[in-house]
Amino acid sequence: MTSLARVLADAGGLPSGWETAFETVDRAVFVPDRVWVWDGTSGYTLADRNATGDHGRDAWNRAAHGADVLVTQWDDGHHTGDEPGDTPTSSASAPAAVARMLDDLDITGGENVLEVGTGTGYTAALLAARGCRVTTIEVDAELADQARKNLARAGYPDVVVIAGDGARGHPAGGPYDRVHVTAAVRATPPAWLEQTRPGGLIVMPWGTYYTGSDWTTVLTVHDSRHASGPFTDPVAFMKIRDQRRRWSGTTFPDDWMDNARQSKPDIEIADITGALYEPVEFVIGLHVPGCIPARVVDPDGVNLWLYGADTGDGESIAVAAFGDGYTPQAVQAGPRDLWTEVQSAYHRWNDAGKPAVDRFGLTVTASGDVRVEQRPWYETPDRELPFRH
Ligand SMILES: C[S@@+](CC[C@H](N)C(=O)[O-])C[C@H]1O[C@@H](n2cnc3c(N)ncnc32)[C@H](O)[C@@H]1O
């Protein structure tokens, strides 16, 4: 048993049926010579296989044989040097997260699988070790090339590695029984529905503009235009390249508040604030499409700014101010009442008894080559939430 397989097994983390694959595939074969490891508190540090000292070979060995996520690329490969870059753009995912998502794929062996986001090739190797026919797509040509070499070296030369945009899928290899996405999306690409056979599954991290957190959703494909399924677990994945948050702040006229609509919040800021994987903010995001929050804390209290983005509704803005010694105030302007939407979303969730995220799900309907309508639901697909994504 590899040390990693032992760590995962001891943690009770190996899903049934995947034991042999995790034991057979040595993750270290897929880990590049330079990786950045989260130090547990303040940032990432380099572990360099070819260096000596604290961040040299021993650190690399611990990282490569351990169970942590390892950043393998910053800033789309434009970053150089030993310090971390600005944005991690590829990683060797945490094996426990890989295992959880593979479990969601419901593999019995022999399925035809499309993986989106090859990265190092490790997940593709696990799928191949499980007897699947695997096509995997990586947007970064250099990473794709390296993954191809890693897979051959590990004994999986039959995995087809494509350099390209995974949002387009790879029709030549379809129809697929499973589409396994190891980068997160906000909008499901229609190609994945078209290229999956009816009854097949799409397993992907999905999230909204409202939070940095994503949840895995397991969609059952009904036909080439319709798929639906529940959210399962929280996951942390980088967004696929063309769905990163590009919105950098709209310039509103200085006097926007003069004509804004005013109201008094009937909830506290604490009601709508949670840690990364607590449900509250994710659930609000399910109700309030295309809304980016920004929390500004100052000595007087907290201002929650809300910006409308990517909804085609024009520019909307709101701010709700909370603090000691004054009554909370909200002002909102533009076509949407963003504060009212957020507050109503909280009330709906609260009135339902604050259900966990796995009681919600998503229905995806493709209405053309590029457009999808995404409708989150509660309990069953016919109980749609009021706002559509
Ligand atoms: C978290 S890593 C995947 C980890 C990988 N499955 C493994 O086992 O090592 C996400 C990868 O998705 C890739 N990616 C981002 N956008 C993509 C896209 N549109 N198509 C294909 N790959 C994409 C990134 O370059 C990155 O390598």
Image (cartoon, rainbow, N blue to C red):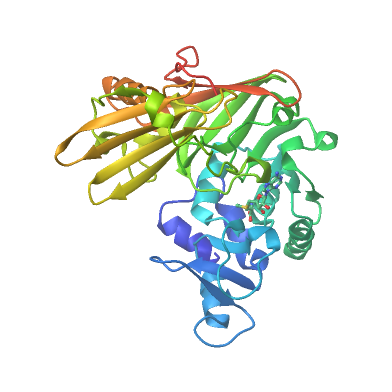
> In what quadrant of the picture does the C terminus appear?
top right
Residue 72 falls in which quadrant of the image?
Answer: bottom right
Residue 81, percent across and down?
63, 75
Q: Name the image quarter holding the N terminus.
A: bottom right
Where residue 149 sits, quadrant-wise, is bottom right
User: Which residue is at the far top?
Assistant: 382
32 lies left or right of 149: left
Q: Which one is in front, 323 or 137?
A: 323
Task: Pick whichever, 205 or 201, lies toward us.
Answer: 205
Q: Position of residue 340 (x, y in %)?
A: 36, 22
In x, y percent, where is residue 286? Answer: 46, 27
Residue at point 45% right, 13% down?
A: 383
Between 284 and 25, the residue placed more toward the observer is 284
The residue nearer to you, when weighing 298 against 163, is: 298
Q: Is residue 28 visible?
A: yes
Which residue corresponds to the image point at 54% horizontal and 32% vertical from the top-left? 309
Q: How many marks?
A: 0
Residue 283 can be seen, yes or no: no
Q: Residue at x 35, y 31 (%)?
A: 356
Q: Eyeballing the image, is 304 above or below 91?
A: above
Of all residues, the one furthest to the left in this rendering is 325
Give the farthest residue toward the right: 172
Is residue 285 shown left or right of residue 26? left
In the image, farthest residue toward the bottom: 52
Q: Residue at x 58, y 31 (%)?
A: 310
* Residue 100 pos. (x, y %): 51, 45
Q: Is residue 272 left or right of residue 193?
A: left
